[in-house]
Amino acid sequence: MTDTETHDGGEATANTPTRSGFVALIGPTNAGKSTLVNRFVGAKVSIVSHKVQTTRAVMRGIAIHNNAQIVFMDTPGIFKPRRKLDRAMVTSAWGGAKDADVILLLIDSERGLRGDAEAILEALKDVPQPKILVLNKIDRVKHEDLFKLAQTANEAVKFDRTFMISATTGSGCDDVMDYLAAALPEGPWYYPEDQISDLPMRQLAAEITREKLFLRLHQELPYSSHVETEKWEERKDGSVRIEQVIYVERDSQKKIVLGKNGEAIKSISTASRKELTEILEQPVHLFLFVKVRENWGNDPERFREMGLEFPRD
């Protein structure tokens, strides 16, 4: 592929070689990785919520900029693992980084380099791929503090470039895209031009519902909940019937998800159905069920469903 029109950086010049590659976004939990991937791709491919560790497996979002197809890998936030699920997520994040052409470390400027961020910097010293530092949420921090933060991080790890952005407003994001489009190796594109994610629709639909679940109940519902799409039926009238199961670990959690007189589950279903209708561009009939599955965090089958390796030790 040598001649193409871009989605986002104007028209590519004739006979300009195409570029393609994988960019792993790594960073502490809630640094804004999913928001940034969605910003780069220009569509929702990764869920966002206030709850930490929302992303559980590597999600790929695909963007075209100038002559390059950039495959962003939104990895789970890296943190000190306590449970098997935690360990699987952190392993997944570093695995995504290992397979990338470029590593993008995203740091929340407000939180700085405390805790998990410091540990990530230490681990990055031994990673051979080109690395760029992206400081997010710059609109909330004084300029002098940003420069100090950038200096400290660059003293710890040799970054090829440093960018300062706001994933929410888009400020500075085009500069990052320009850099990545030029930095990736020459080669054909990995995916069709109109594809924005490699996530199967059944899984994306489950992720959308999980996002609405956390947005509605993030203060009340423990992290240990999971959504699976069990049935997907394309109907003759052009609509789709989707049946999903929300798995929780205890009866008390099931009551929280259902809510008084079913109000919570109704609200979650309505919000999820609305977004799925927009994404699929067809009417959606969504049916949610809540089941108790004790100790699902130790069930290898659930890990496979989420695209994670079950820790054996």
Image (cartoon, rainbow, N blue to C red):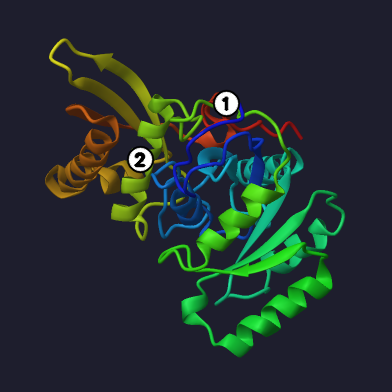
Instruction: Name the disc covering residue 304, or none.
Output: 1
Query: Which SS class for mark 1?
Result: helix
Which percent across, then down, holds residue 299?
56, 29
Which percent across, then down, holds residue 47?
42, 47
Observer-nearest of 20 and 275: 20
Identified at 66% across, 31% down, the residue is 309
Of all residues, the one furthest to the top in this rendering is: 236
Query: Which SS class for mark 2?
Result: helix
Q: In the visual, does 155 lie left or right of 77?
A: right
Q: Amino acid at mark 2?
A: Ile
Residue 75 seen in the figure: yes
Q: In the visual, does 304 lie left or right of 207?
A: right
Observer-nearest of 301 and 42: 42
Instruction: Name the disc covering residue 208, or none.
Output: 2
- In this rendering, the count of numbered labels is 2
Residue 268 lies in what quarter of the image? top left
Residue 26 seen in the figure: no
